[in-house]
Image: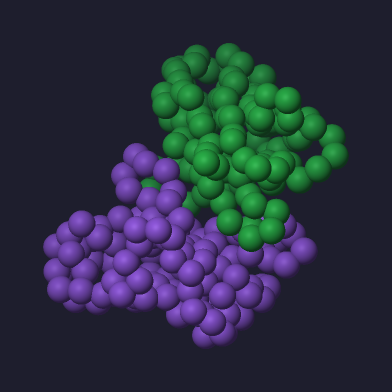
Amino acid sequence: AQSVTQPDIHITVSEGASLELRCNYSYGATPYLFWYVQSPGQGLQLLLKYFSGDTLVQGIKGFEAEFKRSQSSFNLRKPSVHWSDAAEYFCAVGDRGTYKYIFGTGTRLKVLA
Amino acid sequence: GAVVSQHPSWVICKSGTSVKIECRSLDFQATTMFWYRQFPKQSLMLMATSNEGSKATYEQGVEKDKFLINHASLTLSTLTVTSAHPEDSSFYICSAYRQGYNEQFFGPGTRLTVL
């Protein structure tokens, strides 16, 4: 079955520390890959996306993600977290034919001052 | 950029009434739009795919008679929650697929509270 797994439901880091959020997917073929951030009561904001090519993708707000085909993973990273990064993060895969998305369960990030 | 709006941003209604939510692509035409539902502290669940000029395709377990979707133009899709009940209270998010961009563009969401 097609699925997206974000193993960490909650992550707490100190401001200035590095961050890695994990995302693994199970899909028939390599899908489109996305990371979104959502603040409480708000909509989704796209952080970055992978369609093809360079497997290291740069996004907004200093985020990057690396696609690893052999591990079916698309982990999100940031070298130095800011207090404003506290939010919910969703990984999603998009079907290349139907453009339907499957979202992961989300990782809630808490940042300690 | 590609902008998608939703109206209203929040709505409160009484149990048994119907509520309509609009999703508009403001600066592009969208033959395909999607409707999601998000419960508090949970992920987004796809409810249905809305195709302009044809019937919506509903995901398994979604009641098509309860969640009526209409995609009458290339820039507008509507979701009507019929005979709403408190368990229908949720955050509803729409998105629009833009041809050539390989991605969906999301609206800001609509908070529905049914009393």
What residue is at 63 percent from the left and 73 percent from the top?
B30
Name the spot of residue A73 as percent of width and height, x first. 65, 28
Q: Hey, which residue is sitting farthest right in the picture?
A: A53
Nearer the observer, A92 or B26: A92
Nearer the observer, A72 or A19: A72
Q: Quadrant of residue B41?
A: top left
What residue is at 58 percent from the left and 30 percent from the top?
A23
A23 left or right of B88 in image: right
Q: Is residue B106 visible?
A: yes
Provide the letter of the chain coloured green.
Answer: A
Relative to A112, residue A105 above or below: below
Name the spot of residue B24 as percent of width and height, x first. 53, 73
What residue is at 70 percent from the left and 54 percent from the top?
A96
B19 left or right of B60 in image: left
Name the spot of residue A41 as percent of width and height, x first. 38, 48
Relative to B83, residue A20 above or below: above
Relative to A38, residue B49 above or below: below
Provide the letter of the chain coloured purple.
Answer: B
B63 left or right of B87 in image: right
